[in-house]
Image (tube, rainbow, N blue to C red):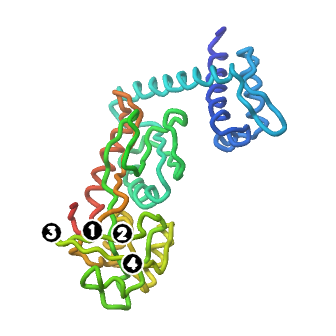
Amino acid sequence: MKNINELTEVLSGLTLFVQVVEKGSFSAAGRALSMSPSSVSRMIDRLEKRLNLILFTRTTRALLITEAGQEIYGQALTVIAATNALFSRADSYSDKPRGLLRITAPNTLGKILLTPFLPGFLRCYPEINVELNLTDRLVNLTHETYDLALRVTETPPVNMVARALMPVDYVLVCAQGYDMELPETPANLSQHNIFFPGDPRFHGEWRFWLHDHQESVLLTPRLMINNSDAMIDAILQGVGIALIPTFIAARYLQNGQLKRVLPDWRIENPIPATAWAITLPSRLLPLKTRVFIDDFMAWLKATREPDGNTD
């Protein structure tokens, strides 16, 4: 490399090149980076000239990566990972949390948990800026340069560092003004309108436990919804009983809009999972990331259970 300007240009080009490969087109990469397709095309042209290689074969119907492009793609990932590690190492020596913290999370988890937490976090750390991307797409932390990902899964990625935030359990709830007498046993649920989550794994028998006593009931859903906001709206109308995640129910139970149904019974979770904080496998986690995880975990412990019971 002749000078530092050329190095800077190549690093920017490689980052863009990785986006084009992973998004599959200039236009998709441009949308991800807030660039026009023509600007993306010009930068890729400059990178090809600088490297003296053809990275893509362009046709009217497809953009195909060449053999040389595949090799450069692998090298580019290594360069980007090394750059991220460099910034992480530098951040780790700072005695004050600062910098841009990039977080990605699923839509529901982010809306219900992160957005109430973030204002207080920003007040505590005035030198940290947060970029939050809510998406149900599985984001690759290495390729897309996020500092932290929240995920709900039974099996966190083995090549990352995963910190358990909370189990994702389910609870039966209804509106405070529900217009029927509440059931006293699981068998009585068949006399009510039951709202199901959209996941087909909730079909079939529901198993309930009261100490060592177990009951199973087969229920027919009156309403199935795959969106948590819509489910809450339906429950609050007071015409049904719904099964929803505890982390979604907690706020509405605390403010009195919802109440628990069969509170002494534990319902078996057909899709046991945990919410995790996922970071890259670096021994030196940036201070901005460390304080976020620590504060978020403390906030979850204090707020996730409306009655203070974490069982």
- The answer to whether residue 52 is above or below residue 163 is above
For discs 1 and 2, the disc positioned in front in the rendered view: 2
Spatial distance from mark 3 to mark 1, Cα to Cα? 25 Å
Q: In which quarter of the image is the C terminus?
A: bottom left
Residue 308 position, x and y percent, is 21, 65
Which residue is label 2 attached to? Answer: 249
Tell me the SS state at disc 1. Answer: loop
Q: Do the residues labelled 1 and 2 touch (CB within 8 Å)?
A: yes
Which residue is label 1 attached to? Answer: 306
| Residue positioned most to the top | 2
Spatial distance from mark 1 to mark 2, Cα to Cα? 9 Å
Label 1, residues with CA under 10 Å away: few <14, some 14-19, many ≥20: some
In this image, 184 relative to 36: left or right? left
Q: Do the residues labelled 3 and 1 touch (CB within 8 Å)?
A: no
Who is closer to the viewer here, 303 or 27? 27
Spatial distance from mark 2 to mark 4, Cα to Cα? 21 Å
Q: In which quarter of the image is the N terminus?
A: top right
- The answer to whether residue 267 is above or below residue 277 is below
- The answer to whether residue 189 is above or below residue 96 is below
Sequence-earlier tag: 3 or 1:
3
Sequence-earlier tag: 4 or 3:
3
Which residue is label 4 attached to? Answer: 219
Label 2, residues with CA under 10 Å away: few <14, some 14-19, many ≥20: many
Residue occupying image coordinates x 21% and y 75%:
264
Sequence-earlier tag: 1 or 2:
2
Tell me the SS state at disc 3. Answer: loop
Which amino acid does the dot numbered 3 rest on? Answer: Asp
Who is closer to the viewer here, 216 or 188? 216
